[in-house]
Image: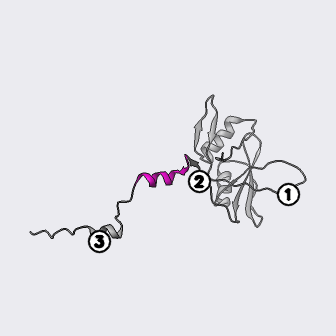
Amino acid sequence: MQILGAHVGVHSRDEAADQAFFRDIVKLPFVGAGHEFIIFGVPASDIAVHESTSSGHDLYLMCDDVAGFAALMKSKGMTSTEPVNRGWGTLMQVTLPGGSTLGVYQPHHKRPKAKAVRSGGATRKARKVAKAPSKRRSAAKRATRPRAKARRR
């Protein structure tokens, strides 16, 4: 048993408008899951546990240029806060069409590498390498191979 990823649910008062935001503005890849339900793919994620006086969860999208993201939101007529550098990252909030807010930040901290998803005991890359043996011969085999005679013209 292993964790394959994470699923995030965004609760919305206007599902179609929020889906359009992630599809058309943020341009996340997506698949139809039936009954007009869309599931969006996101790049590798991480989880941080913060001490708090209450329980709950936060959703933040990470990006490599939060100022550029803020400019994009403004150009699309989206309501958002100005980016603020908090040391660990530069953070902003965007209000989704359905009314909820979404945190977006540019991390300034180290991030863990994404864990490769394994299937059948080997990663996809390992299985590909196992199926495609190297065409290069070892030094010992090259030394014992007879040399080709020079061609005469």
In which quadrant of the rendered image does the C terminus lie?
bottom left
Q: Write down the residue under mark 1.
A: 51
In which quadrant of the rendered image does the N terminus lie?
top right
Dot 2 lies on which element? loop
Dot 3, crowdedness within 10 Å: few (<14), some or many (≥20)? few
Q: Which mark is residue 143?
A: 3
Q: Which of disc 1 and disc 3 is earlier in sequence? A: 1
Mark pair 1, 2: CA separation: 29 Å
Q: Which mark is residue 111?
A: none
The amino acid type, in three-letter code, at marker 1 is Glu
In this picture, residue 38 sits left or right of residue 151:
right
132 or 71: nearer the viewer: 132
Q: Write down the residue under mark 2.
A: 116
In this rendering, the answer to whether 10 lies above or below 151 is above
Q: Residue 48's quadrant in the figure? A: bottom right
In this picture, residue 55 sits left or right of residue 78:
right
In this picture, residue 1 sits left or right of residue 147:
right
Q: Residue furthest right?
A: 53
The amino acid type, in three-letter code, at marker 3 is Ala
Residue 64 x %, y %: 63, 60
102 or 75: nearer the viewer: 102
In this picture, residue 135 sits left or right of residue 13:
left
User: Which mark's residue is nearer the viewer, 2 or 3?
Assistant: 3
Number of numbered markers: 3
Q: Residue at x 85, y 57 (%)?
A: 51
Tell me, what colour scheme is on the image?
one colour
Magenta-tinted stretch = 120-132
Q: Which of disc 3 and disc 2 is earlier in sequence? A: 2
Whether residue 123 is in magenta: the answer is yes
Whether residue 70 is in magenta: the answer is no
Residue 145 x %, y %: 26, 67
